[in-house]
Image (spheres, grey):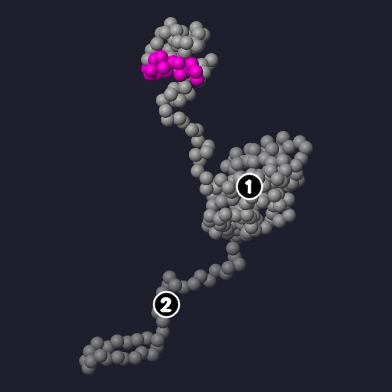
Amino acid sequence: MEKKNYNSREGGPKIFLSKEPVSHPEETKSTVPKHQVSSVGVRENEVCIMEQAANQTTKSVGVRSSIIVSTRQRGNSLLKYLRNVPWEFGNIIPDYVLGETCCALFLSLRYHNLNPEYIHLRLRSLGQSFALRVLLVQVDVKDPHFSLKELAKICILSDCTLILSWSPEEAARYLETYKCYEQKPADVLKERTEKDLMSRMAECLTTVKYVNKTDSCTLFTTFGTLFDLANASREDLSLCPGLGPQKAKRLYDTFHEPFLKTSTMTFQ
C-alpha cells in the first residue's frame, strides 16, 4: 500500500492517505444467481406488475373529455354508434375508461357461453383501481336467463354494476351516458322537498288513504297547525267540507294508533 506524508507544519501532525478504497461489509453484493427464482415469486411479480399497470392507467387517464377504448375492442360494432362523445384508443386494462374512477368491461353473452372463464380473468386483472366498475353485457342469445343469473352473482361478489343491452346501439348509449354524467352532481337523483309549509303538509297528509291535496288544504285552513289537527276529535274532522266519516275515521286512527304493535313474546 502506497502512502504519502503531508506535513502542514514542521513537527505538526502527519496525515496518511491511501489509494486503496475501504470496503464495508454491508456494501458487498450478493453472489446468489438470478436464475434461481421460484415460480411462486414469478407469479407474485406478475400480479404486482398488473396492479401497477392498472394504477398507472388511472393516473395517466385523469380527467379527459373522451372515452378511452382498449385496443382489444377493435372491430366491436358498438364503436360506430359512439357519436355523441369523442373516443380514442389507448393502452388500458379495462375495455373502456369512462372517467377517472369509472371503467367498463364489455361482454357478449354468446362469447360468455363459449368461454365462461374469460370474465373472471378480466375482473381479476382490474384489481381495485376503479371505484365504479361496469359490466356491460350484450344479450345476443335466445335463452339468456341462466347465464344472466350467473353473471348477476359474479357482479355481486366482484362489486360490479351489471348493465344489459340488446343491441350495439343501446350499449353505445350507456357508455355515452356514463361519460356525459361523469362530472354531474347527484342533485338530479335526490328527492326534491318543498320548503313552504302548505306543500309539506299536503305531502304528509296525502299519505293517508283517500286523502287528497284538496282535503289537506281544507284541513290546514281549518286547524292551522299539525298539532291541532292531530288533537282534533273524529267529529271535528268530519265537519270539514269535503271530508266524510270514512276519511275522518282514517285520519283519526292514523294520529292515535300506536306506531309499533305490542309484542306478546315473554323473555326469560
Kindly give the residue lying farthest to the right in the view shown: 142
Rendered image: mark on residue 251: none
Q: Residue at image x 42%, y 77%?
A: 23
Q: For the residue labelled by badge 1, is the local secondary structure a helix, a strand or a loop?
A: helix
Q: Residue at image x 67%, y 50%?
A: 82
Between the C-alphas of marks 2 and 1, the distance is 62 Å
Q: Residue at image x 60%, y 67%?
A: 35
Report whether residue 206 is seen. no
Which span is picked out in magenta? Answer: 213-227
Q: Is residue 224 above or below residue 244?
A: below
**Residue 83 image offset from top left, x and y in percent:** 66, 51
Rendered image: mark on residue 175: 1
Q: Quadrant of the N terminus?
A: bottom left
How crowded pointer 2 is (Cα within 10 Å; few <14, some 14-19, many 20+) is rated as few
Please check the rendered image and state whether residue 137 is part of the magenta-colored stretch, yes or no.
Answer: no
Reading the chain from its start, which is encountered first: label 2 or label 1? Answer: 2
- Residue type marked 2: Ser
**Residue 122 image offset from top left, x and y in percent:** 64, 50
Front one among 38 and 119:
119
Q: For the residue labelled by badge 2, is the local secondary structure a helix, a strand or a loop?
A: loop
**Residue 255 image offset from top left, x and y in percent:** 43, 14
Q: Is residue 58 above or below residue 5?
A: above
State left or right for residue 158 relative to residue 229.
right
**Residue 112 image offset from top left, x and y in percent:** 72, 45
State left or right for residue 247 relative to residue 79.
left
Q: Quadrant of the C terminus?
A: top left
Report whether residue 239 is seen. yes
- Residue type marked 1: Leu
Rendered image: mark on residue 23: 2
How crowded pointer 1 is (Cα within 10 Å; few <14, some 14-19, many 20+) is rated as many
Front one among 77 and 134:
77
Question: Can you tell which quarter of the image residue 87 is in?
Answer: bottom right
